[in-house]
Amino acid sequence: MELRSEHISDRPAILELTGRAFASEEGSNPPVEVALLDELFECDGYLPGLSIVAVDAGKVVGHSITTRGFIGHQPALGLGPISVLPERQRQGIGAALLEETRLRAKGMGESVIVLLGHTSYYPRFGYRPASELGIQAPDSKWGDYFMALPLGGSEVPAGTFRYAEPFARL
């Protein structure tokens, strides 16, 4: 499996796998994550080096995107959505995407990555409730599902996190 920055030509496959990864049981409308991702590719917060695909045998099997966010006026990163083809889940692809994201973000000199996700999954990668670091979620109802990963090297700012603009339309 290869991890690399996404190419524009990967986007149809990325949107399809995201739709499959987040599909509801009813399987009707496309999941909101598909439209969100499409908007994230075009927004000011898009960071090309942090839109990462997992490719196996020439096929995109996973994707993660991390965009520019802010804690107060300080830059920070917001991870998500992260998607893996349903038939390829539980094979380490998501873990590999998370680690590649961490390494790239740290190499860029970033201080922290935040995300909204499962409290049973992300802590094994070092994520913990963002409130423990003094970072408040955009929505207080998110509680411990809003998590942060400090990257070291620079102080993690405290305050309310603000995602890239497309998240505000959810």
Image (cartoon, rainbow, N blue to C red):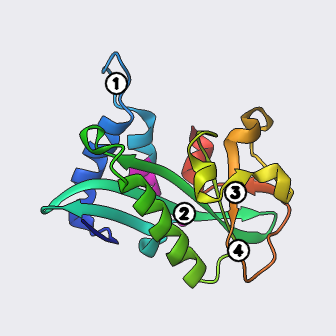
Are the two marked residues, 1 and 3, in contact with CB atoms closer than 8 angstroms? no
- Percent of width and height locating residue 107: 56, 84
Query: Mark 2 = which residue?
Result: 67
Dot 4: what SS? loop
Give the mark count: 4
Does residue 22 show up?
yes
Secondary structure, mark 2, is strand
Question: Is 40 rendered above or below residue 3?
Answer: above
Whichever of callouts 2 and 1 sits on the residue coming sooner in the sequence is 1
The residue sitting at 65% across, 77% down in the picture is 110
Question: Is residue 111 depicted above or below 91 in this figure?
Answer: below
In magenta, the rendered stretch is 37-44
Q: Is residue 41 visible?
A: no
Quarter of the image where one finds residue 52: bottom left
Q: Is 39 one of the magenta-colored residues?
A: yes
The spot of residue 94 in percent (x, y) is 41, 53
The residue that label 1 is drawn on is 29
Q: CA distance from mark 1 to mark 4?
A: 37 Å
Q: Quadrant of the N terminus?
A: bottom left
* Disc on the earlier residue, 2 or 4: 2
Question: Distance of mark 3 from mark 4, alpha carbons?
Answer: 10 Å
Q: Measuring from the top left, give residue 165's x and y in whole percent.
A: 59, 54
Q: Closer to the N terminus: mark 2 or mark 3?
A: 2
Mark 4 = which residue?
A: 111
Q: Residues within 10 Å of mark 4 (few under 14, many from 20)?
A: many
Check residue 124 for magenta coloring.
Answer: no
Mark 2–mark 4 CB contact (< 8 Å): no
Disc 3 residue type (three-letter): Ala
Element at badge 1? loop
Q: Is residue 61 left or right of residue 67?
A: left
